[in-house]
Image (cartoon, rainbow, N blue to C red):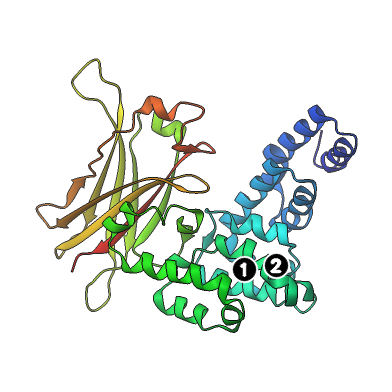
Amino acid sequence: MNEKNCLPVLILADKYNIISLKKLCLNYAITHILPETSLKDIFNIWFSYATKAYHQMLIRACVQKFAEYFQEILSNDWEKSWLSLDRDQMIEILKCNQLVVTSEYLLFEKVVAWLNAPSHPERRGPAAAPLLAQILPLIRFAYMTADDLSKVENSQLAESQAKLFHPLILLSYKFQALSLKSRVESKEFITQQFLLRNYCDIRWDKRFAIDSSIVVANVETAFQFITRSCAFPASDWSWTLKVQPWRSNDPASSSQLRFSLAADNIDQNRSIEYMLSFVDEKKVIRSIWGRHTFSKSRYSIEIEMDNKIELSCLQDEDSPYISFNNLNLQLHIKLID
């Protein structure tokens, strides 16, 4: 097997439904070919075939590669390739939570450009509603700014498809208006549209992914990140989120995960509430809420959990906390008035 014959052999294996050969080709492509292949070739060759043949493992591997370089894919240099995506390919991309993108509004604008592509009139007119019904729930409207949400609400597309847009937009306004404690208590905000992506702009929230093998190996993981602040003139706030394996003095107890949040380089008090969520690819599994005033003398807190997460739970094949070998977290911070 090599990079020249892998795809032709896979096509033949699909044609004659040779399952063992398909598995061999897919594993080889994901392990050896995609890491060494240009983004354009992955996009135009491997992703194109994977979506036509419904190879979910290969689709995911391609999309994960796109996610890392998604800013490049959204650039003008890629416009022709972007507009040529078919419906299934667009859906697979929008489902991805790992997309590195400046903001959700920018992504929405690119989706609108795709819908309005002159060479694809089938995306508009009578076919628009069924297509939008599949795409819109994958847009994270809740993570747009209020100004951007207003732009979406008043856009020609939203006004022409009000039945599809308005429930999503209104729910997003509600999400933004509520305290983090109220969000935790609500069951409305656990679907995929409330999962963060890897946004590049400075915000009040952040997504984190930890390799599960690192977690179960009793290795501490620390994430340094910045958020907006309430300071004037505008400045950023620096934070550190630590994930630490911990064991009590009781020899009969098992190792558990502990989470702590620290305010770095603090020069003024920070009164905030926080929401730490455990998520998979499709939903929020569990959320924890708390509040604290960070100061120079109280700059770090342990995030209290009613039901601790044992490391042994993360080693189970069907652990709800592990998705594709990652423990995925998202942290929201909100100022307390």
Mark 2 residue element: helix
| Residue 73 on image: x %, y % | 64, 64
Quarter of the image with the C terminus is bottom left
Left or right, 160 with respect to 205, comes to right
What amino acid is at disc 2? Trp
Label 2: which residue?
A: 82
Above or below, comparing residue 123 to residue 221 in the picture: below
Q: Is residue 246 placed above or below 324 in the rendered structure?
A: above
Q: Is residue 120 visible?
A: no
Closer to the camera in the image, 326 or 233: 326
Residue 87 % position (x, y):
72, 61
Label 1, residues with CA under 10 Å away: few <14, some 14-19, many ≥20:
some
**Disc 2 and disc 1 in contact, CB within 8 angstroms:** yes
**Residue at far front of view:** 163
Direction from residue 39 to residue 321 in the image, left or right: left
Label 1 amino acid? Answer: Leu
Mark 2 or mark 1, earlier in chain: 1
Picture coordinates of residue 40, whole percent (x, y):
73, 59
Q: Looking at the image, which residue is at 86% across and 33% down?
A: 17
Point out which mark residue 74 bears.
1
C-alpha gap between disc 2 and disc 1: 7 Å
Q: Which mark is residue 208?
A: none
Residue pushed farthest top? 252
Label 2: how many Cα within 10 Å (few below 14, some 14–19, many 20+)? many
Quarter assignment of residue 233: bottom left
**SS state under label 1:** loop
